[in-house]
Amino acid sequence: MRLQHLLSALALCLASSGAVAHDISDVLKVGTFKSTTNNPRGLWVSNSIRGTVDLIDPLSLRLAIDYTFNAKQPPSDGASFPTSASHSLGGGAGLDWTISDHWGLSLDLSGTGSFKSTTSTTISFDTKLPNASGEIEGQLESRSWNAGASLSGYYDTAGDSKWENTITLGFDFNWVQSTQKINQAVDPKTGKPFDLAQVKTDCADPTSKKCPKFLKTVLQESSAGVGEMDVMVDWTQTFIQMIDWSINGAYYFYTQDPSALGYYSIAKQGAPTMNFGGGIPVSPMLFSVGTGIGVTYSGFRSDVDFSYGQYREDSTGSTSFSIGVGLKLRYDINDHWRVWVTGSWQQDRDSQIATSNSGSGGAGVRYTF
């Protein structure tokens, strides 16, 4: 019912106050993750509805509603705990100001409601127990929400030559609040319950090199909030009015050690992602770079982008990274209707030297009034 009410509110905003609705679009995505110790996630489905309202020249208002469903999954081979189904409902609003033919500013606000999930995860730790492997299965319970704001500005040469340029500078801030804990644990070899007190004792040992900070956070069953900030720059060159080539980069800052959140990807699930080629990182980012090329011809457009991101080092000193590629194919049917399909692939290596592959596919439609 909450989703129905929000959809009604969006439609009302697009039609009221004498404003002219510029466009409305709907995007459906399906994706999957290969679960690892740092990233115990699986199949997800999301739907995003977006609309643009022309207010007074030169201001435009953008509205968005995002719904994400993480599917229930049975225990994997040799595991004891299933992954529960979870739902996330969020939204946002943005204001675009076209200052002139060359300059523009955008302000965005977004957030998600509280979402809860339980999943199975592998817990690796140093242990002094005889005949113990130091690896058990735990049932992770989490409750999280996200809220953020972004400000960006651009300069566009906006000419009619065969070589045009656009430079964009952006600042983002996102607050992530998460409460995570391990409800119970079992020894995968015997299937019998495992005493979490022993894990806490072994992880509290300052000489422990195998127990990461995020696991220590989860074992303390505490709630934490972390502010994420990034500075982004993008440069796009347009050739002969039909080929766009772009390069971009971003650097990330945090108000405190992100390991205070526990499992990072769990805390971030459900957060809206605006980039069709990217996914949710499995660990806190340090920096990212990317490049892409787009070609437009007779109503068709294709975009391909490549990205590389390096994650922050954790207490083990391990360096982890992410690489990804995205594809988008678009067709303008006429002056009113536009359709597109997307696909992406991402590979992550986390601080436990575990590699996970994820992929997603989607389709969208937009109607311009």
Image (cartoon, helix red, strand yellow):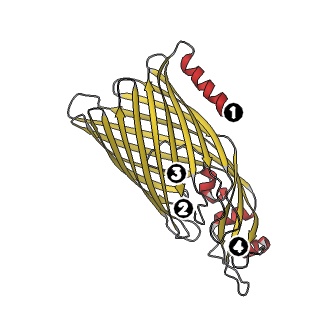
Distance between the Cα atoms at labels 3 and 4?
34 Å
Which residue type carries mark 3?
A: Gly
Distance between the Cα atoms at labels 2 and 4?
26 Å
Crowd rating for badge 1 (residues with CA inside 10 Å; few <14, some 14–19, many 20+)? few
Q: Contact, CB < 8 Å: mark 2 with mark 4?
A: no
Which residue type carries mark 2?
A: Lys
The circle drawn on residue 203 is: 4
Nearest to N terminus: mark 1 or mark 2: 1
The secondary structure type at the circle numbered 1 is: helix
Distance between the Cα atoms at labels 3 and 1?
24 Å
Q: Quadrant of residue 234?
A: top left
The secondary structure type at the circle numbered 3 is: strand
Q: Depth check: 315 or 276 in front? A: 276
Q: Contact, CB < 8 Å: mark 1 with mark 2?
A: no
Q: Depth check: 263 or 140 in front? A: 140
Query: Is residue 17 in view?
Result: yes
The residue located at (64%, 29%) in the rendering is 6
Q: Determine which residue is flagged by label 3.
A: 31
The residue located at (42%, 48%) in the rendering is 343
Q: Contact, CB < 8 Å: mark 3 with mark 1?
A: no
Nearest to N terminus: mark 4 or mark 1: 1
Image quadrant in which the N terminus is located: top right
Image x and y of residue 266, in percent? 63, 55
The circle drawn on residue 2 is: 1
Which residue type carries mark 4?
A: Cys
